[in-house]
Image (cartoon, helix red, strand yellow):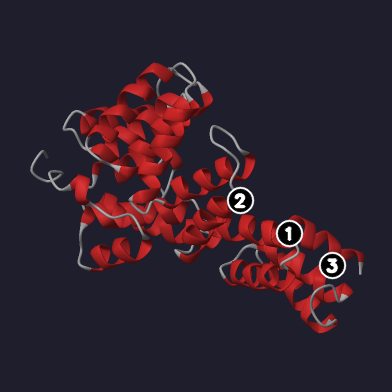
Amino acid sequence: AKLYWAEVGKMRYDMESIRESAARGDMRARYRLATELFRGLQKQKLEAEGMFRALADEGHEISQAICLEKSIGGRPKDEQQAATIAKKAAGTQDPAAEIYLGLLYESGIGVTKDLSQSFLYYSRAAAQGYAPGYYNLGRLHFSGMGVRMNKEKGLELYQKAADKGYRAGMVNLARCYRDGNGVQKDIVEATKWWRKAADDGDIKAMAELANHLFDVGQRSSAIKMWEKAAENGDTTAMRILSAQYQLGNCVKKNIKRATEMEKRAAELGDVDAIHNLQKK
């Protein structure tokens, strides 16, 4: 395991790099791709579940644990067994296992909730240069969970994760700069990190960037970003665009386009879109 993870500090976490490595059969990259997709929308989560199932069938321990925890692929739900597998894998200094085990301790799934243990395992992963380790450790420092609050340290760790191409780190970094939280407010810097994450396909970044652009009067740019988010399955963006086309705000009024957007959102299970269509 030490040899297997020896190059972890050199790993890149942008989606292009992950997909390229996954296409070559790299199990670490396939797992990272699955976890990134699982952060996304319902369609992406379904794809991620299929990847976790395949990895579990090939003997990937943390994927096996995830399938047990979330009852994926017909496996009976067994959170305690998932935690047992995670502990065993974390004992081999597998940073992905350390992160997963840390998350279990943070949420109290299959184990007694213990933020000090989360801090321990996130720290071990971060010490290996693993970007999710930087990110999760940053969350704890920033919020004061399991450790004394230190926003400067949290921001530093978000930055390290973002510099490795980790999208969640970029989004949190953007929010910090937007709000002046732990750092001097800097909208230019916030926009830079939102755009980097959005360009790498992060839907949360697309939506937050679109909202910001709209608020500062860059309406046409906001519409383009909402369109991009909608293309990637963001139902909130679809509903926003539907309203814009319905009213003719920032775009030429187009009732047909407005209805299409609302219907797409409803087909994807958006409750508000379903309700809006039922009223018509």
Amino acid at circle 1:
Val
Residue 177, placed above or below residue 119: below
Element at badge 1? loop
Which residue position holds label 1?
216
Q: Which mark is residue 162?
A: none
Residue 177, placed above or below residue 201: above
Element at badge 3? helix
Amino acid at circle 3:
Leu
Corner quadrant of residue 121: top left
Which residue position holds label 2?
187
Where is residue 111? Give x, y as percent: 40, 21
Cα distance in 3D space between marks 1 and 2: 10 Å
Sequence order check, earlier mark of 3 and 2: 2
Which residue position holds label 3?
277
In the image, what residue occupies the spot 59% across and 71% down?
Answer: 228
In the image, what residue occupies the spot 65% across and 64% down?
Answer: 268
In the image, what residue occupies the spot 84% across and 72% down?
Answer: 249
